[in-house]
Every structure is written in C-alpha cells, then in structure tokens.
Image: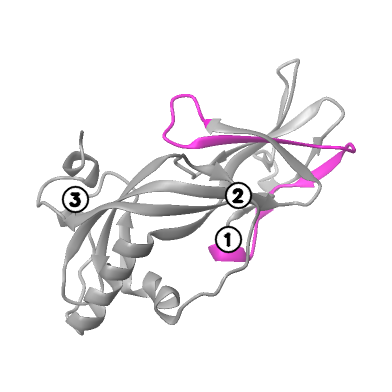
Amino acid sequence: MFKHQAAKNRHVSTLERLLPALLVVAAVSGATAQDAPPSAPTDPELDQRALDYLRENGIDVELGTGNCVSKADDGSEIPGWNEEEKRWQQIPVGDGRWLSCLSFFTGAETKVLVRTTFSLGLWCWRGTLAWYNTSGDERLRVTSIGPAPDSQYYLITATTTEPGTILVQPGERSGGLTWPLFVHAHYDTAALEPAVEGLTCEQQFAD
C-alpha cells in the first residue's frame, strides 16, 4: 500500500546521481522501440550496473503540475494563465476558494520505455508507487489528491488557512516545473525486461 509521507533527507549514491544520464526516458506512455532516439554503444559494464540499480532501487521522480485554477462552490474558475494578456497571474485562494491543479503524477503504477545510453538497448520498466509527498508554496495545505476525470493523471486540490493570492508560474527547479505545487514520488521496480519490437510498454505489460 503506497502512502503519503513527509519529505526526508537521505544519502544519494554516485550511481544514483548518474542514473538519469545512463537511462534515457523515451516516453511515459505510448512509445514503441521504433520511436526511441538512437544511442551510441560505449560501456556495456556501466550500462548493466545502471539497469541493475534500476531493478533493485526503482526511481525517484519530481513531478510538476499544470492547468492550475482557483475554484469556488458556485462553479466559478479563475485560471492561473491569463490567455487574453498571455501571462501568468495571481489567483485567489482561501475564503471559499481553493486551488485545483492537474499533476503529471500517475498514481499507483506507471510504465515507461527507457533506452540505455550505451549498449543494452531498449527496456520496458513497470513501477509501483511506494510513497509520495507534496511540496510548494508553504501557505498551501493539500486537501485531496486523486485520479482526474477522463485523464491518466491526478488532480490536486489545496487551500490556505488565511485568504490570499497565489502566483502560478513556471519555476526554476527541475527544468521549470510549474509553481506552486510539486509531487515527489518513489516507484519500486515491479518489472524490467527488454522491449518487444512493435509494442508499447503498456501493451507489453498488459494484464
């Protein structure tokens, strides 16, 4: 059973720091071996160590949010992106309004096509969620997180104890994840096997 937990500090090994560079994610879903970018053979031994680490330790990911809006019981919505003025804007939260953001978090299970950067080719990885936590603007209190309607992703809602405004904008962290909410998750490896040509990882791991 996966769980929400407080953020924690832990030792990060050298191989763990290298892992994102050794394994290139081709796509979260819907990619086949033909869609993946090419890679040049370099070091089979290091490649195997990276795969072994992935198999034994899983993956930590930091996920952003999008489509953040301020909502109220009367159904009114104020988007974080001002389409008319083409800019990010402050939106009200608290005093009967709450923040609703779509997260790229996919919940209990995820399937990813990865290519090793060296010699071992394409692999399909299936992970199961072990834990997750949320962070972002310290004024926000997450009230719910669950599957969004008609989407593979999750919807996060949050409010504040004191009414105020929240600026929704791309942040500087982790390649521009959208402020003000992030999800940090750890997925244990449930399966890791060579990709089958012509199949997506979803098809290869179909129950």
Q: Position of residue 152 (x, y in %)?
A: 41, 34
Image-based side of 120 in relation to 125, left or right: left
Q: Which residue is mark 3?
A: 32
Quarter of the image with the C terminus is top left
Of labels 2 and 3, earlier in sequence is 3
Name the foreground residue: 171 vs 196: 196
Q: Residue furthest front?
A: 1
Secondary-structure class at tag 2: strand
Q: Is residue 37 left or right of residue 185?
A: left
Instruction: Select label 2 or label 1 by which is in front.
Output: 2
Label 3 close to label 1 by CB (< 8 Å):
no
**Closer to the camera, 3 or 41?**
3
Identity, as a three-letter code, of the amino acid under mark 2: Asn
Of the two numbered discs 2 and 3 in the rendering, the one whose residue sits closer to the viewer: 2
Residue to which mark 2 is pinned: 133
The answer to whether 51 appears left or right of 169 in the picture is: left
Amino acid at the residue labelled 3: Thr
What stretch of residues is rendered in magenta? 147-176
Q: Is residue 27 magenta?
A: no
Q: CA distance from mark 2 to mark 1?
A: 19 Å
| Spatial separation of the CA atoms under disc 2 and disc 3 | 31 Å
Q: Amino acid at mark 1?
A: Gly
Pointers 2 and 3 in contact (CB under 8 A)? no
Quickly name the residue at label 1.
176
Asked if the magenta segment contains residue 174, the reply would be yes
Closer-to-camera residue (22/40)? 22
Q: If you read the primary sequence from the N terminus, does the residue marked by circle 3 or circle 1 appear first?
A: 3
Residue sitting at x 79%, y 28% = 97
